[in-house]
Image (spheres, grey):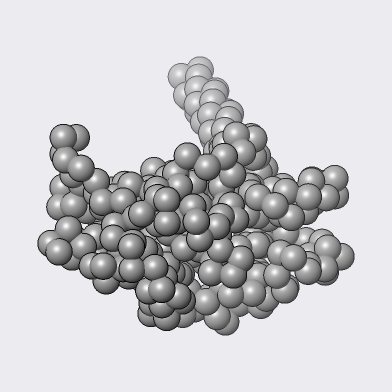
Amino acid sequence: MRLSVALKSNDKLVSGSAAIAFSFAACLASSTAFASITVLDDAQRQVTVAKPAQRIVSLAPHITEMLFEAGAEKNIIAVTDYSDYPEAAKKLPSIGNIFALDLERLLALKPDLVIVWGTGNAKILANKLRSNHITVFESEPHNFEMVATSIERLATLAGTDSTGKANAQKFRQRLDNLRKTYQLPASATPVSVFYQMIRRPLMTINDTHMVSDSIRLCGGRNVFGQLKELSSTITNEAVLAANPDVILTSGENVDSLVDWKQFPILTSVKKNNFYAVKGDWLNRAGPRILDGTEALCKHLAAAKAK
């Protein structure tokens, strides 16, 4: 009888221990599941969400593209105008554009993460959103690696790490292949390039812009790379003085460059080195920047051949 009681007593002890262990494991799993997530944005601010963001608003087309690449497309509840890639992005509701955005409408969506283009008017909007207790991630990639890490960081915030890491790695691999194919050795002379961002007023970009990163990879040199501002208005005389080997613009064709033919002294005019790359590829700091870079590299290779 005593033996029987002892066994029952031990059973209770074992059962009680198991319950405590199960309860502890459940608490641990629960605390892990809801652990906060923190990443650094492109403004070097800490961005923290209490759990993976499920209601994300994208306030720039390049951000929308990166969210899709991060595997977070199902978490996007609204975008801005011109978020037209990939095709599925066209079906997402638009809340206007960054220059005329209805803040009340945005707040009414109750987003748990808003991703803004970290420049110009968007900076003001970002501060307004933070004052309304909205979590904000500022996105402003200036080079290829920042695009790759953006995909990874957005995936982390959305809880889609595996997809984000895989696609970021594909991006890096393609970038490495482009470098092996087109990058000049240090001793080689680069092709001098003038990037015409806008014709009237005549504007260009400096070396901190992503387009300059593409130019460098392709064996080129931005003749206005040393300008202080990211984008600046310049004169025809400045272009004549720089005498670039190539004049580049964004778009479907080179129609906006024909005015330069009135200056036959330019090397780019003598050799007919006018090239255009699709604007969405070249100007959006998103995954398709490599499409734009590859197209640019082919153009500069053709210019070198001349």
Quadrant holding the C terminus:
bottom left
Could you say which is closer to the camera, residue 47 or residue 301? 301
Question: Residue, x 72% and y 73% (percent of image)?
Answer: 95
Residue 229: percent from left, percent from top: 59, 44
Question: Residue, x 74% and y 55% (percent of image)?
Answer: 121
156 up-or-down from 97: above or below: above
Residue 209: percent from left, percent from top: 48, 49
Question: Residue, x 72% and y 59% (percent of image)?
Answer: 111
Question: Residue, x 64% and y 34% (percent of image)?
Answer: 46
Q: Is residue 100 visible from the viewing direction of this image?
A: yes
Number of numbered discs overlaid on the protein picture: 0
230 up-or-down from 4: above or below: below
- From the viewer's perspective, tell me whether residue 149 is left or right of residue 52: left
Could you say which is closer to the camera, residue 296 or residue 175? 296
Residue 264: percent from left, percent from top: 33, 68
67 up-or-down from 199: above or below: above
Q: Is residue 278 visible from the viewing direction of this image?
A: no
Could you say which is closer to the camera, residue 157 or residue 128? 128
Residue 37: percent from left, percent from top: 59, 39
- From the viewer's perspective, tell me whether residue 288 is left or right of residue 59: left
